Amino acid sequence: TGAAGGGSSGNGFTEIFRDDFTGPAGSSINGTNWLYALGTNYPGGAPNWGTGEIETMTNSTNNVYLDGNGHLAIKPIRDASGSWTS
């Protein structure tokens, strides 16, 4: 569950956001706290933005999911035609 906070961690830093990625394995991220970057670019932006990505970013739980142990998994997948999603 994501949490906004203002508590001090005791090391001089103040935590302002945290997500512990709790949830069943294979489930989606918390849509209240996170947004997906979808496609290969943003409207009006350069094609293949970012690091020259060749994949199409998705919101599919085949690519982005909770692992059931407090971790977020981001899995690139290559299909039979050679196209990538993540």
Image: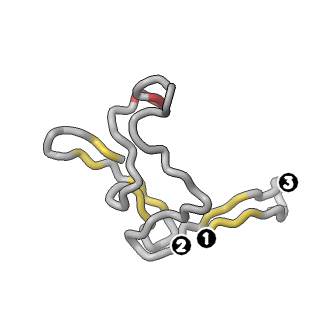
**Of all residues shown, which one is farthest toward the left?**
80
Q: Is residue 46 left or right of residue 60?
A: right
Is residue 48 placed above or below 1 in the rendered structure?
above
Q: Nearer the viewer, residue 36 or 16?
A: 36
Q: Nearer the viewer, mark 2 or mark 3?
A: 2
Question: What is the spatial separation of the Cα atoms under label 2 and label 1, in whole angstroms?
Answer: 6 Å
Residue 77: % across, % down? 27, 49
Q: Three-letter amino acid code at disc 2?
A: Thr
Contact check, label 1 and label 3, Cβ < 8 Å: no
Which residue was labeled with disc 2? 22
Contact check, label 2 and label 1, Cβ < 8 Å: yes
Secondary element type, mark 2: loop
Q: Three-letter amino acid code at disc 3?
A: Gly
Q: Nearer the viewer, mark 1 or mark 3?
A: 1
Instruction: Identify the image quadrant of the N terminus.
Output: bottom right
Contact check, label 2 and label 3, Cβ < 8 Å: no
Residue 37: % across, % down? 48, 44
Pointer 1: residues within 10 angstroms few (<14), some, or many (20+)?
few
Q: Is residue 10 left or right of residue 57?
A: right
**Could you tell me which residue is drawn at 43 percent across and 44 percent down?**
38
Which residue was labeled with disc 1? 1
Is residue 2 placed above or below 53 in the rendered structure?
below
**Could you tell me which residue is drawn at 41 percent across and 25 percent down?**
47
Which residue was labeled with disc 3? 12
Question: What is the spatial separation of the Cα atoms under label 1 and label 3, in whole angstroms?
Answer: 24 Å
Q: Three-letter amino acid code at disc 1?
A: Thr
Q: Is residue 85 left or right of residue 13?
A: left
